[in-house]
Amino acid sequence: MRVDVRYYSRNGGTKKLADAIAAAIGAEAKTVDKPLEKYADVVFLGSSVYGGKPDPSVVKFIAANARNIGKIVVFGSACTGKSTYPAIKSAAAGQAVKTAEMFFQCKGQFWFFNKNRPNDQDCADAADFAKKQIRILGVT
Ligand SMILES: Cc1cc2nc3c(=O)[nH]c(=O)nc-3n(C[C@H](O)[C@H](O)[C@H](O)COP(=O)(O)O)c2cc1C
């Protein structure tokens, strides 16, 4: 069973979560401009909110790699705490790709709001979430 981690991060917050998740599950976190090398049963996909939406490169990643994605697990951060989960789920469904029911979301720094978020606790929570998802989705 293969698990991959891909993310898009403008200011480094989502990268922090991606690195914590990758370390927890023994994978390598790569940006969404790196295609999947082969089929992955689970792809942890990091995507934050910019102007109310995910970055277009995240949606492009799904379309370009649909054949190689078994299921997407969404994670991310946002100033308001809003998740890109609904937008990602909809984009994935349009490519006949499944999205896990659960997602990880935390606050993200934006100007002087949520300073240093995601912080160490957020990263630890994201790592725990990823390990639980691996168990739930049956990937060992
Ligand atoms: C251009 C821009 C637009 C943003 N728009 C939103 C938004 O609409 N809603 C929100 O909750 N956060 C918004 N944010 C805050 C980001 O979602 C938040 O800082 C997030 O942690 C960024 O992740 P990153 O560090 O991985 O890029 C915006 C940030 C930027 C830079």
Image (cartoon, rainbow, N blue to C red):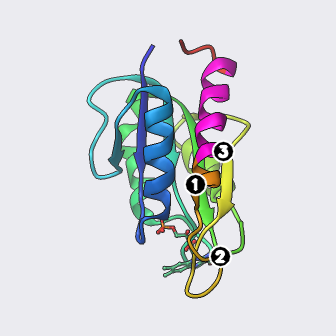
User: Are the two marked residues, 3 and 2, in contact with CB atoms closer than 8 angstroms?
Assistant: no
Q: Nearer the viewer, residue 66 or 26?
A: 26
- Give percent across and percent down for residue 117: 59, 67
State the CA–CA distance, disc 2 to disc 1. Answer: 13 Å
The quarter of the image holding the N terminus is top left
- Give percent across and percent down for residue 140: 53, 12
Establish if 50 lies above or below 29: below
Secondary element at tag 1:
helix
Q: Residue at x 55, y 43 (%)?
A: 92
Q: Residue at x 53, y 64 (%)?
A: 54
Q: Earlier in the sequence, mark 3 or mark 2?
A: 2
- Give percent across and percent down for residue 103: 68, 44
Q: Which mark is residue 125?
A: 3
| Residue 40 in sight here | yes
Is label 1's Cβ within 8 Å of ligand 1? Answer: no
Quarter residue 79 falls in? bottom right
Q: Horizontally, is 24 left or right of 135 in the view? A: left
Q: Which mark is residue 96?
A: none
The residue that mark 2 highlights is 114
Q: Amino acid at mark 1?
A: Asp
Span of residues in magenta: 124-136
- Give percent across and percent down for residue 129: 66, 36
Q: Amino acid at mark 3?
A: Asp
Secondary element at tag 3:
helix
Q: Nearer the viewer, residue 22 or 92?
A: 22
